[in-house]
Amino acid sequence: MTDVIEIPPGAAPRRAEAFKPKLHVSNLNFYYGEKQVLHDVAVAVPPNRVTALIGPSGCGKSTFLRTLNRMYEAVPRTRAEGIVTLDGEDVLSMDVVRLRRRVGMVFQKSNPFPKSIFENVAYGLRVNGRMRKREIEEAVEHSLRRAAIWDEVKGHLHDSAHALSGGQQQRLCIARALAVNPEVLLLDEPCSALDPIATAKIEELMFVLKESCTIVIVTHNMQQAARVAEYTGFFLLGRLIEFNKTEVIFKRPAKKETEDYITGRFG
Amino acid sequence: MRHFIEALEEFEQKLLEMAGLVEAAIHKSVLSLTEREESHAEAVLRNEARINQMEIEIDDFAVRLLALYQPMAKDLRFLTAGIKINSDLERMGDLAVNIVERALSLMHEPPVKPLIDIPELARLTEGMVHKSLDAFVKRDSALAREVLLSDDAVDNLRDSIYGELKAFMQRDPSTISRALDLIFVARNLERIADHATNIAEDVLFLVQGVDVRHHAEARQ
């Protein structure tokens, strides 16, 4: 898929940005057993930008996020149909190890391995290939620096990761995801359990990280979407109702459903 | 959420109360000139402090709602438009006071000429003010656009008033002081009409999310 997509559908922003999508999704349908939870989703995710996905619980935004690196395959009887491409390559048929190396993920609840801080980050590097001890040490430091947690942990890299605070654990998980140099980082409500200071650190991190990777974040916090994302998509009942520049979504959404949701008049 | 919607309604009520005071001030300022009636002038001067006080209260209220609820989309447009309308209304109140000051100075002087064009200018201006506020209440963008289109007529009438009064001053220098007062009245009325235009622009932003300021073509 090499075509240049003119964003967006719906109300045109004042300056449309032409880009070659990093991820391109069309006609995506997703099923848990017989139950269809995503309907005909189509979206072009711009490279080196933060794209936020918002919508009420159960609207399909997390499921959608999981189709981008096929994390849903861990759940039995799930099925994705349609087209998902990463730089034009078919995501749904790609070797899954290679896919997940290219598309990393961080979850709502920080889930460091019950190992040391160092080993949490080194783990993916070891799985991914042979590296010398020295190279691994350098890569761990580099990832911890990119995740803006190095200064806080450099003196006790071999302590248990579980001794870290919630916000530090979440940044450690980001460092772990970054260790294999992913092109895309998927964040599923990464700040929902964090205080405002820890949240601010993660948001600050996103600003830096997007220079080197494409970020897609699911968030229930609309102010967070407004703060960090250049693009925002609104999901409702398994459909992508509206996708546009964040500023347009929050200032002048084209669809009534979007407006009702973001102004809290929903339901 | 219900609290927020109620608070927005309260905010609009306060703004409309302010608008009522300002409309009355403009109307009475014109009457003080045309009817040479000091009681009208006094009423305007008395109300000024109340208008200023309301401006502060409405601004505080808006900032509080922005801080507490972080409104989005139409609520955000409503509050930001409301803040600007509030400031336009306060300025209109000041301009009404300016008119009253000129009216008071003219009240005990013989008239330069029978007032014809200034009452007409006042009629157009008051019409624009009323229509812009009506457009706000009804969220009516068509009505707001009508206000924008009537601004030229006000500017033209003001120019012809300037021309006529200039001719009076050239013919008879004893009229200079009184004619200048009338020129200032015309200027203040025209400035009030400009603020009505601003309100109409804010209504368009509120209803349609478009910014038409300084873009003549977008006003159509």
Image (cartoon, helix red, strand yellow):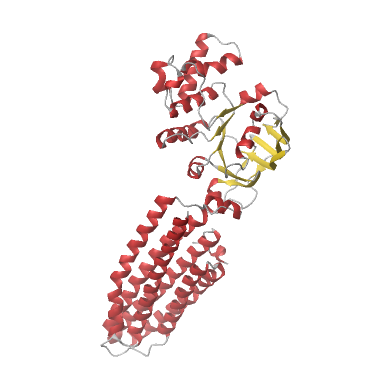
How many discs mark residues in the rendered view?
0
Judge from the rendering whether residue A105 lies leftward or rightward of residue B183; answer left or right. Answer: right
Q: Nearer the viewer, residue B29 or A96?
A: A96
Residue A254 visible, this angle:
no
- A41 or A166: nearer the eye? A166
Q: Position of residue B37 (x, y in %)?
A: 30, 86
Q: Position of residue A263 (x, y in %)?
A: 52, 53
Q: Position of residue B142 (x, y in %)?
A: 57, 69
The residue located at (41%, 18%) in the rendering is A154
Question: Above or below — where is B211 with respect to A39?
Answer: below
Q: Is residue A24 left or right of residue B76?
A: right
Residue appearing at x 35%, y 76% in the figure: B25
Apparent side of residue A47 relative to residue B33 in the rendered image (left or right): right
The image shows residue B48 at horizontal and vertical percentages of: 30, 72
Q: Which quadrant of the view contains residue A255?
A: bottom right
User: Quarter-wise, where is residue B194 in the image?
Assistant: bottom left
Quadrant where the N terminus of chain A sits is top right
At 44% from the left and 58% from the top, the residue drawn is B79
Asked if residue B127 is positioned above or below residue A122 in the image, the reply reads below
- Depth check: give the residue in front, A110 or B62: A110
Residue B50 in sight in this render: yes
